Amino acid sequence: MDKPFAGKTIAITGAAGGIGQWLCRFFGEQGATIAALDRSDKVLDLPHKLGADGISVKAAVADVDDAPAVTAAFAGFGDVHVLINNAGGSRHPLIATTDPAGWEEEIGANLNGAYTCVHAVLPQMVARRGGNIVNIGSVNGLAALGDAAYSAAKAGLISLTRSIAQEYGRYGIRANIVLPGTVRTPVWDERRAKDPNVLKTLERWYALGRIVEPEEIARVVAFLASDHASAVTGAAIPVDCGLMSGNIVMARELTVENF
């Protein structure tokens, strides 16, 4: 079986979360050594959990917004050929209920943390004259969809991605960003406990009539991280079941057609 990432170390932040664990398993099955980083000590379970399936995992606990901890973690990882900045999340859905500390927390987790990890790996990538950075953003970075602080950070991450692509392309380093829509992760199990119809309500807004599965994110990230995307850099790619293609609910109401 062809393993396109054999011999490469792929660092994945937010590795203990729903999408993070999918990414670790996906790339591990493609032959990569995984350098897993998360602020939760659950990340330390991954070497045993994935190792049982023959996947090599190095794990470290660090908050991506803690620069010294990130520097120490990446020093332990050694060579990193691909960085996937997956860490992030939102705890402050409304501007009205977000105080300055909450704003800083969201920006730190979703933007500053990505920069901190990029800063940790760029010197070795420059020295090797090659490397690959894939950031996990959100469709919230393209439109106002709630979670104002989170959205502002994800919009900033798009800009950061493009700046890296511009500045470091001459060293053979590519940088791209994937923009997921609603993804089926354990977070939605908690939401469904409060509202069993929450996903049905959301699905109305998606052109494909469904939300995104974690492995669908992994496959697009894998393309961007692979040599198949050797000419792709600075791209921001929605993986959103058509959410950003337009407003399908409004279109149906305007045309009075049930399409």
Image: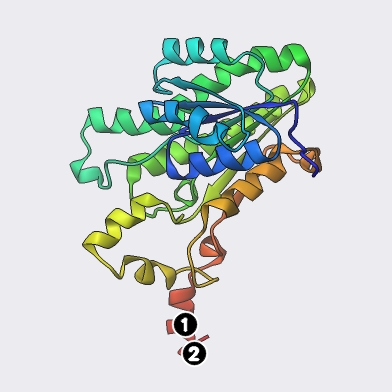
Q: Residue at x 44, y 75 (%)?
A: 249
**Residue 112 position (above or below residue 199):** above
Mark 2 → mark 1, Cα distance in angstroms: 5 Å
Q: Is residue 56 visible?
A: yes
x then y, percent, for residue 6: 75, 31
Residue under label 2, please give it.
Answer: 257
**Residue 84 position (above or below residue 218):** above
Q: Quadrant of residue 32?
A: top right
Q: Is residue 236 visible?
A: no
Residue under label 1, please give it.
Answer: 252
For disc 2, the neighbor class at 10 Å (few under 14, some 14 to 19, many from 20) is few
User: Circle 2 — which element?
Assistant: loop
Labelled disc at residue 79: none
In the displayed structure image, the side of residue 104 where residue 226 appears, left or right: right
Q: Quadrant of residue 28?
A: top right
Q: Amino acid at mark 2?
A: Glu
For disc 1, the neighbor class at 10 Å (few under 14, some 14 to 19, many from 20) is few
In the displayed structure image, the side of residue 237 where residue 212 appears, left or right: left
Please name whichever residue, 102 or 27, is drawn nearer the observer in this view of the structure: 27
Please name whichever residue, 63 or 232, is drawn nearer the observer in this view of the structure: 63
x then y, percent, for residue 15: 48, 34
x then y, percent, for residue 212: 51, 59
Please name whichever residue, 237 or 68, is drawn nearer the observer in this view of the structure: 68
Q: Amino acid at mark 1?
A: Arg
Total numbered circles:
2
Q: Mark 2 or mark 1, which has the lower sequence index? A: 1
Q: Quadrant of the N terminus?
A: top right
User: Circle 1 — which element?
Assistant: helix
Q: Residue at x 19, y 42 (%)?
A: 97
Q: How is the image coloured?
A: rainbow
Asked if disc 2 and disc 1 are in contact, CB closer than 8 Å, the reply is: yes
x then y, percent, for residue 56: 61, 27
